[in-house]
Image (cartoon, rainbow, N blue to C red):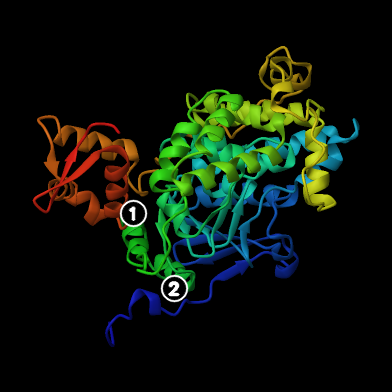
């Protein structure tokens, strides 16, 4: 029986979870039991929770136990310290790939990692990934398929592979290719880092809450006996942090977003660079500055990686997650077998020696990356891919996947579809647009702001006697 009013969600005092496993501090992954929830905690804070083979081999059997447990009704993933997970342990992978005797271990790492990522996408229980800190590369793979992906002001998101002479993997070519417009292409090629709220606003996270509320949120979720997806969603939504008046807008909005979609729509890196060069002379100084900076960024990246990444993301748009991971397995195998010297040059320069400046890429120029080089990563006849293993998954694994966009902001294409339907007989008022989408706005924090952004980028908006009129003619 209650003895007083229930405290607000952000004031709930979390109860202590049960931690199992020996020598807690020595374990790279901790496993916790708290009410209906089972939590894995990545425990290599001094390495920013970089994912290694021991962690993968620890997670997979535990996820299987939880998936089949009648006591587990929710799985939560989190990390200690400043990171959820800063990526895979690619320095060790590179070392193994350099010698023929140890190369199978490098390939096996990617196989184990990609299989774990797919298993996480198919969990039969609700899965909540808490991205409260650095979330990059292999860390993205752990959380991106979760139906609930929580970002905070501390979240730093990136797929940084082209920086190190590699290619986005862990299913990136499935999920990046499904982002609004050409945002995914931009992120894949540039390795750009997104911070805080923009991770949520661009659809990579489903929710945005203050970091300080995470412990009480986890405690509150654990109090449910058998929570539904809707209950979990509503509980997280309660803690949504609204944009403050003095908070700067995201960097990939407005005119810059229009320029981004225009430049990165091409299917060749050369044409992307040409478009950016043209945009760098834009009368809009913001657009011009962005284009110049993006050109400089792409110049720093491996030319081979840029072409491989673009080819992969275009293919990934027509693949299932499983097929995209298998394609990425072939690419990873090719890199391990020396299809490009940039894999060694990039990891050595950026992660091992930590040198400044542009690594010694070979080929050094985009135009010198020939179709024959690209075939090394994609052709079925490539000797570099001949050792590619097939991803092996449990026979008991059935399709439990929940649409990873189900609890995120509505897609831009969905918003445009509604606007086009409203404008089929002519222009309508902006208030009419918002009224028609009222149910979406009420269901999800941040929806109104996204609708307004889409309207101003994709439609003609004019003032008519103090009423804003929307005409769905593409600008």
- The numbered disc on residue 216 is 2
Residue displayed at 72% across by 24% down: 388
Q: Is residue 273 left or right of residue 28?
A: left
- Quadrant of the frame with the N terminus: bottom left
Q: CA distance from mark 1 to mark 2?
A: 19 Å
Q: Is residue 7 above or below residue 396?
A: below
Query: Callout 1: 10 Å neighbours few (<14), some, many (20+)?
Result: few
- Is the C terminus in the top left, top right, bottom left or bottom right quadrant? top left
Between 289 and 457, the one nearer to me in the picture: 289
Q: Residue furthest top?
A: 381
The residue located at (51%, 48%) in the rendering is 67
For the residues labelled 1 and 2, say whether their Cβ atoms are less than 8 Å apart: no
Q: Looking at this rendering, what residue extends furthest in the bottom direction? A: 3
Q: Which of the numbered marks, if any, corresponds to residue 139?
A: none
Q: Is residue 281 visible?
A: yes
Asked whether the viewer can see residue 171, the reply is: no
User: Which residue is painted at 38% across and 47% down in the image?
Assistant: 254
Residue 378 located left or right of residue 151:
right
Tell me the element at label 1: loop
Q: Nearer the viewer, residue 366 or 434?
A: 366
The residue where tag 1 is placed is 228
Instruction: Check the image and report above or below for 13 versus 426.
Output: below
Q: How many marks?
A: 2
Secondary structure at numbered mark 2: helix
Residue 162, quarter of the rendered image: top right
Residue at the (65%, 45%) spot, across then down: 160
Residue 117: horizontal and vertical position, in percent? 58, 42
Residue 407 location (% of width, % of height) = 35, 49
Whole-percent x and y of residue 473? 23, 31
């Amino acid at each position: 029986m209650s003895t007083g009013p229930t405290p607000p969600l952000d004031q709930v005092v979390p109860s202590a979870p049960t931690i199992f496993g020996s020598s807690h501090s020595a374990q790279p992954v901790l496993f916790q039991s708290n009410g209906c929830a089972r939590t894995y905690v990545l425990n290599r804070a001094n390495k920013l929770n970089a994912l290694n083979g021991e962690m993968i081999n620890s997670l997979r059997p535990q996820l299987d136990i939880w998936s089949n447990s009648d006591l587990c009704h929710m799985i939560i993933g989190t990390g200690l310290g400043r990171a959820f997970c800063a990526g895979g342990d690619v320095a060790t992978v590179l070392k193994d790939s350099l010698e023929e005797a140890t190369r199978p271990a490098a390939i096996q790492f990617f196989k184990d990692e990609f299989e774990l990522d797919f298993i996480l996408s198919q969990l039969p229980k609700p899965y909540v990934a808490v991205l409260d800190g650095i979330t990059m590369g292999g860390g993205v793979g752990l959380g991106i398929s979760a139906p609930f992906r929580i970002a905070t002001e501390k979240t730093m998101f990136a797929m940084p592979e082209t920086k190190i002479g590699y290619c986005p993997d862990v299913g990136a070519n499935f999920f990046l290719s499904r982002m609004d417009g050409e945002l995914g292409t931009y992120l894949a090629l540039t390795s750009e880092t997104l911070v805080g709220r923009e991770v949520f606003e661009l659809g990579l996270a489903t929710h945005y809450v203050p970091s300080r509320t995470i412990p009480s949120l986890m405690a509150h979720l654990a109090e449910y006996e058998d929570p539904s997806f809707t209950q979990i969603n509503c509980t997280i939504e309660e803690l949504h942090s609204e944009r403050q008046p003095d908070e700067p807008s995201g960097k990939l909005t407005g005119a810059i977003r229009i320029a981004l979609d225009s430049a990165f729509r091409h299917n060749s890196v050369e044409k992307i660079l040409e478009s950016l060069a043209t945009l760098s002379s834009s009368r809009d100084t913001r657009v011009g500055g962005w284009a110049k900076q993006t050109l400089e960024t792409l110049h720093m990246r491996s030319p081979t990686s840029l072409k491989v990444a673009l080819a992969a993301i275009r293919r990934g748009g027509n693949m299932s997650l499983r097929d995209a991971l298998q394609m990425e397995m072939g690419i990873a195998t090719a890199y391990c077998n020396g299809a490009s010297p940039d894999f060694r040059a990039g990891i050595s320069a950026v992660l091992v020696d930590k040198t400044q400046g542009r690594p010694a890429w070979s080929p050094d120029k985009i135009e010198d990356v020939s179709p024959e080089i690209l075939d090394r990563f994609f052709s079925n006849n490539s000797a570099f891919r001949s050792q590619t293993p097939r991803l092996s998954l449990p026979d008991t694994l059935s399709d439990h996947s929940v649409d990873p966009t189900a609890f995120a902001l509505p897609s831009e294409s969905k918003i445009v579809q509604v606007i086009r339907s409203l404008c089929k007989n002519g222009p309508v008022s902006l208030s009419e647009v918002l009224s028609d989408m009222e149910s979406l706005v009420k269901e999800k924090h941040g929806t109104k702001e996204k609708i307004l952004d889409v309207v101003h980028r994709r439609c003609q908006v004019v003032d008519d006697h103090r009423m804003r009129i929307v005409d769905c003619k593409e600008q």
